[in-house]
Each structure stands twice: as C-alpha cells, then as structure tokens.
Amino acid sequence: MVPHRQQSNGYRVYTQKHLVRLQQILIYRELDVSIDAIKSLLSCNDDELLTTLSQQKALLLDRQQTLAKMINSIEVTMNSIKGKENFDILFEDIPKEKTERWDNLSRERMGAEDADKGMDSFAAISEQDMRVFKAESDRITLAFAETIGQATDSELVQKLTHEHYQMSNSFNKLVAAANGVKTVPDLSVEDYVYMANSVDLTEVNELCEHYGEGYAEHARDAMIYYAEHTLRTL
C-alpha cells in the first residue's frame, strides 16, 4: 500500500489504513512471523480485516499470559532467594552443617511447599530489620542460657521469658507488616504453650541445646509457667 503524495509539496499522506497496516506488521514481527507469512496475511481484503485483527489480539493475549507466567516464576524465585538470605541471617553464627540438617528436618516434616512459603514470608523484610531482630534474639538467648538450672519461677528467668514473649510478638508483627497484613494479635496462652512444646521437634531441640545442655526443657518450663501465671491473668 503506497502512500499518496500532496501535489503542492510532495509530502506523503498516510491514511488510517496505512496506520493499521503498520500496526499489523509490527505485531506480526513481534510474534516472530516470517516476512513471507506477513505478506500473505496483509493481502486480505477489508472484509477480512476484523477477523485478522481478532486473530492478532488472540495471539497477543496468549503471549501476554505466557509472559505473565514467566514474570511470576521469576518473582517467586527472587522471593525465595531473598527470604532464604534473610532467614540465614538469624543462624549465621551457627555451623552450616547444623543449620542444613535442621532445614532438611523441617522440610521433611512440613513438606517442601509449606517450608518454601514460610521462607518466602521473610522476603519483604529488610536486612536491617532482620539484623536488629537477630541482635535482640541473641541477647535474650545468651542471657537465658546463663539461667539454666535456676528456678523456673525466679525473677530473672521470668523477666527474660517476658522479653522473649514480647520479642516473638514483635517479630510476628514485623513479618505480617512486610507482607501487607496490618493487624496481628499477640500470642495467646495456647499459642505460647504450643511454641514452648515445639522443643519436642528434633530441629528445635537441637537448636536450643546448641546454646547449652538442658536449654530446651528449661525454656519449655519457663514459657509454660509464664503463659499460665502471667498471660492467663491479663
């Protein structure tokens, strides 16, 4: 289709048909259609134009869906990597062979899909926030390790348990906020007792015992005492 020329100045004049034809060519090239095939497609008459455009639209929608799936796959992979990096901050001071063993045990128990979802929830948290949480977690953990053997209801043990409870709530809120959840209730009595009893899980037990022999049972007893004698009275 050759454009007309104005007799007065020789300029080419492009019509709506020229623009449609150019649009078709660009679309077909984007879809990797060969030159010969494009020539054949462009030879259709005006009556066939709507059908041709409908076909183009269908091809583009299909390409759009394919690209959307590819983008989603990339985002999932990025979240997984970022989440794992943040999670690893919490255990960077522990020998790698231990953390890998605990990770494998969790995956066997939870299933890979649920484990990955849990890891992905850390992706939106900033590295700075994770390091602030790690510093507080390390402080409480090491201080609590020093109380192994002391009475569960002692003032110091319960003070540290209270700080652990507050830290747990703060971290739950941090994860929730990073994932767009605005309101998260504090851990209930039942929630905290359930957390205390997680020391029965091999990976949790070994993590606790990494900080001192008897840590796991000491932590369980202190947390359950706190839940029953402090949280239940609130």
Image (cartoon, rainbow, N blue to C red):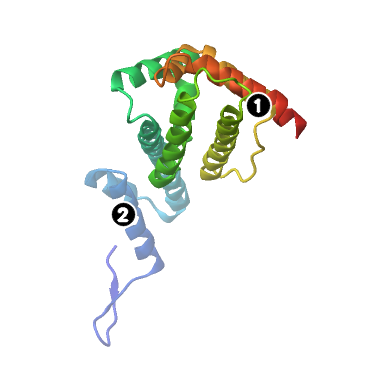
Taking 171 as reference, is 153 above or below it? above
Depth check, mark 2 against mark 1: the one in front is 1
Q: Secondary structure at mark 2?
A: helix
Q: Is 119 situated left or right of 3 in this image?
A: right
Q: Is residue 184 above or below residue 111?
A: below
Location of the N terminus by quadrant is: bottom left
Query: Can residue 210 be seen in this snapshot?
Result: yes
Q: Position of residue 53 (x, y in %)?
A: 43, 50
Q: Position of residue 203 (x, y in %)?
A: 44, 15
Q: Residues within 10 Å of mark 2 (few under 14, many from 20)?
A: some
* Dot 1 alpha-carbon crowd within 10 angstroms: few under 14, some 14 to 19, many 20 or more: many
The residue to which callout 2 is attached is 26
Q: Earlier in the sequence, mark 2 or mark 1?
A: 2
Judged left or right of residue 148, residue 182 is right
In the foreground, 34 or 93: 93
Residue 211: give x, y in percent of width and height: 41, 21
The tag on residue 192 is none
Q: Which mark is residue 226?
A: 1
